[in-house]
Image (cartoon, rainbow, N blue to C red):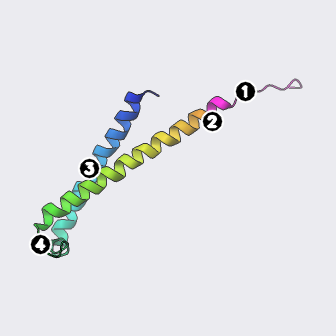
Amino acid sequence: MSWKHVFAVVTGCALMGLLLGGLFGFGSGRITPDFFRRLIPWQEVEPVGFATFLGATIGVLLGGGLGCFGILIQFLLEWRKLGKAPTTSAGQ
């Protein structure tokens, strides 16, 4: 597994998280705009844009984390597979 493969997987997962989180935030901002309008107590914000921004930001973090977790699991499985050499018994 090269560093380019690791970079591509984590970046792809983060971008997919960006897309899905942004879509989720956009949908939640359209459904419940009053919730996001006063999320910051001292300032009113545009609810759909703020919800989309929050969803996309959290999506990047969670998607990148999921990509890192996938790479870690793949590394552990390959390491475990390399550690086991095929054994043959004399009686069989």
Q: Earlier in the sequence, mark 4 or mark 1?
A: 4
Q: Secondary structure at mark 3?
A: helix
Q: Is residue 37 visible?
A: yes
Q: Amino acid at mark 4?
A: Gln
Q: Secondary structure at mark 4?
A: loop
Q: Which mark is residue 80?
A: 2
Q: Earlier in the sequence, mark 4 or mark 2?
A: 4
Label 1 with label 2: CB-CB less than 8 Å: no
Compared to 37, does 53 lie above or below?
Answer: above
Q: Quadrant of residue 23?
A: bottom left
Q: Disc 3 to disc 2, how far (Cα)?
A: 33 Å
Residue 32 location (% of width, % of height): 19, 73
Q: Amino acid at mark 2?
A: Arg
Q: Is residue 87 left or right of residue 38?
A: right
Residue marked by disc 4? 43
**Which label sits in the foreground, 1 or 2?**
2
Q: Amino acid at mark 1?
A: Pro
> What residue sits 36% from the left and 46% below the top?
64
> What residue sits 10% from the left and 72% below the top?
44
User: Which segment did they paint magenta?
Assistant: 80-92
Q: Which mark is residue 18?
A: 3
Question: What secondary structure characterizes most of the magenta part?
Answer: loop
> What residue sits 30% from the left and 53% below the top?
59
Q: Which mark is residue 86?
A: 1
